[in-house]
Each structure stands twice: as C-alpha cells, then as structure tokens.
Image (cartoon, helix red, strand yellow):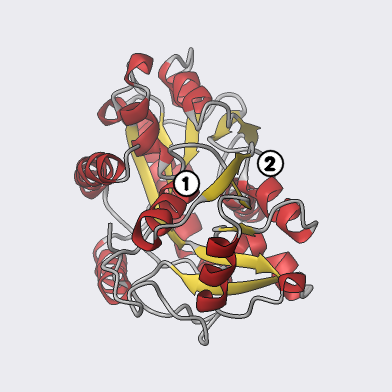
Amino acid sequence: MSFTKRAVLKLSCAALVAFSPLPALAQDWEPRRPIDFVIMAGPGGGADQIARFIQSVAERYDLTSRPLVPNNQGGGSGAEALLHLNNANDPDHTILVTLNSFFTTPLRQANLGIDIQTFTPVAMMGVDPFVLWVHRDSGITNFDQWLETVRGMNGDYVMGGTGSGQEDSIVIAFLSNAYDLDITYIPYDGGGAVARDLAGQQIMATVNNPAEAKGFYEAGDVVPLLAFSDERLPAFPDIPTIRELGHDFSYANQRAVVGAPGMSDEAAAYYQAVFTQVYESPEWQGYLESESLSPLWMSPEEQRAYWDTQVANHRDLLASLGQ
C-alpha cells in the first residue's frame, strides 16, 4: 500500500516522455451525445472536486465534441456507480472517476458481480494522500495529544468518514489497531460532508484528503496532525508521517478515469487522448501541486496491472484489519 513519491515522480516523468498526446478530435470516433461522467462519491468530496476540475479543463480547451456531464453516484460505498457503469446502455458515452472503492467495494460486496478487469482503462491522474485532522478548538496540536484524548474518552471519541470499507475507514482501522484505540465511527455520503461536519464540530476528527479539508484549513477551522504518506507533504512540512512514527504504512486514493465495460476501442482511444491532454495541461499539473497529489501517469496496460496489484493489496489489508 506504499506510494513513494520519488518512485511516483520517476514513473510519471518517464511516461510523459514516452507517451505523446494525440489531438482528441483527430480520432475516427467522436461522442454523439453528452458524456455521462460518473463520480463514485457524493458532492463536495475529493473525487467530486477532481471530476469538476477535469470538466473545466476539458471545456476550457474544447477537448470533447460533447460535454462531460458530472453524475454523482456515491451510494453503497461506490456500488451504485460500479453497477451504473457495469449495466451502461451506452458504454461509449459512460466514464467513471474512481477512488480506491473501485478495488474495495467489489471485494466487500461480491454479490454485485463486478469484475473491474472488464472496465476500460482511460487515465491514471494521480494519487491523493490522507491526513488526520482535528478542529482548532479541540486544543490538540500534535498526534501524541490526540492519542491521549482518544484513550481518555473510552469509546466516546467520534470520527466521521465515508463508510465501512471506504478509504478513510481503512486508515482509521489501522490507527485503532496500531494504537489500541476505541473510536466511534459515523458514516457520511461523501468526504465533503465529512470535512464540513468537522469544521462545524459535529465530529471530533477525520482523515480527509488535503483537497477536501483545504478551505477549512485555510480558514483556520481545522488542524492537520499526521500524514499517511511516505514523505512529508509539501503543503504541511511540519506534520510528521505515520512512517516517521515507526509504522510501515502509507495510504493514498487513486484518482483515475475508467470507461464502462464493452466500450469500443475507438471510443477508448478518444478518451485516452482527451485525458492525456488534461493530464499534461498546466491547470492539472498546478492542481496536483496545490492539492498535494502525487502524479502517477500510466498506460492502459500499466493500469490493468496496477488494478491487479491493488486488488491483491486491498484483499490482504482488509483481512488484516478485520474488514
């Protein structure tokens, strides 16, 4: 589950040299109707923010002949979105913005009958780390104080997240196991709602992605305590990582775009060219930096291999955490 930023940057730079984008509209195939741009999370979370930012870049450069239409389908820890794509009536006009529930939800809900290897690789846009956050009025300014507070509340310490088996719940489960903590967990529809309720002091802590908490952090409402990354995040250079505390663990959300099963090769090539241009745009490169994402470009073949690796890793991780 480790994402070393140095390795990520090396892979990204090598891919950018080797993969030259094709003009999106020079393909034989073009969309004939608006593109169903499915988001496997609720409004306001990291996946939703990224999808709408991507949409704005595509519109700015007129990269698609028909508009990308965001469609939030976050129910069932992403099951709603996966089923929507799996059963798409028009695979050539249906694409999905994913996170790690792309791997975990089919593992945890085998009855869905989802085989992610039937989906169509489009673009790997980056990976998004997690950070532990508290409200400024808690008086907690470091991780040791947080541990003392949680232990002193004997199960009454309340954290929010996006549901059992979701990315944040995996990180919280790791913390609970590693430090023998008893935490009450409240599920929400999306990371945006989680971040808002921490800022409103409806919950006591979260493990949101930096982008989800950024506005509240800049307003001074929330305080970062710990990063679940291999290296310190440039946006929070004073915040230690879980590895610095002696734990061989890091965790990040994939930020990727995939197509529906059954998408034609021509449509796949079209979207791959479009999202290559989005990835290489100054806007997206600036977004990666400003929102503390690590670049991670992959070819379609590399994406399929990455999916296999992540399914295996998440199967082991969920089992080790009792999920």
**In the depicted structure, whether residue 322 falls above or below residue 44:** above
What amino acid is labelled 1 in the image?
Ser
Image spot of residue 53 (x, y percent) = 63, 54
Q: Quadrant of residue 48?
A: top right
In the image shown, does 13 or 223 lie closer to the viewer?
223
Residue at image position (63%, 33%) is 72
Residue at image position (55%, 60%) is 209
Viewed as shown, does residue 26 lie left or right of 138?
Answer: left
Q: What residue is shown with label 1?
A: 169
Residue at image position (49%, 50%) is 168
**In the depicted structure, whether residue 107 falls above or below residue 269:** above
In the image shown, does 61 or 4 lie closer to the viewer?
4
Image spot of residue 276 (x, y percent) = 41, 54
**Circle 1: is it few (<14), some (14-19), or many (20+) Cα within 10 Å?**
many
How many numbered markers are drawn?
2
Considering the numbered disc 1 on the image, is that residue within a helix, a strand or a loop?
helix
Viewed as shown, does residue 298 lie left or right of 156?
Answer: left
Q: What residue is shown with label 2?
A: 43
In the image shown, does 117 or 144 lie closer to the viewer?
144
